[in-house]
Image: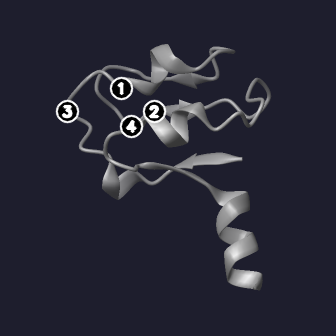
Amino acid sequence: MPVVVQHKCPQDHPCPCVRICPVDAVKQEGFDAPIIDETKCIDCGECVRFCPYQAITDISLQENISVS
C-alpha cells in the first residue's frame, strides 16, 4: 500500500500523482502533501513510480525488504 513520506514532499506545487492515479485515490488540498485513500487504492504502484521526489513509497515493499 502506498504511503506519503511527508518530509520528502516539498508541498509547494500541485501533486502530479493526483492525475496519474487510475482510480482517483490520490487527493490533494491546495499544495499540502497528497493523501491516499486506502479504500479506493488498488495498489497499482503508478503513484510510487511517478512521484518525482520519491515522496510516495510502497510500504509493503519496505516490509518485505526489512524481513529479508
Residue type at numbered disc 2: Pro
Location of residue 17 (image quadrant): top left
Mark 4: secondary structure = loop
Structural distance between the alpha carbons of marks 3 and 2: 11 Å
Q: Is residue 2 left or right of residue 54?
A: right
Query: Is 48 located above or below residue 58 in the figure?
Result: above
Residue identifier under label 1: 15
Residue identifier under label 3: 12
Along the line of sight, the residue nearer the viewer: 19 or 13? 19
Query: Would you say the residues marked 4 and 2 are in contact, meaning their CB atoms lie under 8 Å apart?
Result: yes
Structural distance between the alpha carbons of marks 1 and 3: 9 Å
* Residue 37 drawn at (x, y percent): 67, 29
Query: Would you say the residues marked 2 and 1 are in contact, meaning their CB atoms lie under 8 Å apart?
Result: yes
Select label 1 or label 3 by which is in front: 1
Residue identifier under label 4: 33
Q: Which of the two labelled residues, at mark 3 and mark 4, occupies the earlier sequence position?
A: 3
Q: Residues within 10 Å of mark 2 (few under 14, many from 20)?
A: many
Count the labels in the image: 4
For the point 32% across and 40% down, the residue is 52
Residue identifier under label 2: 34
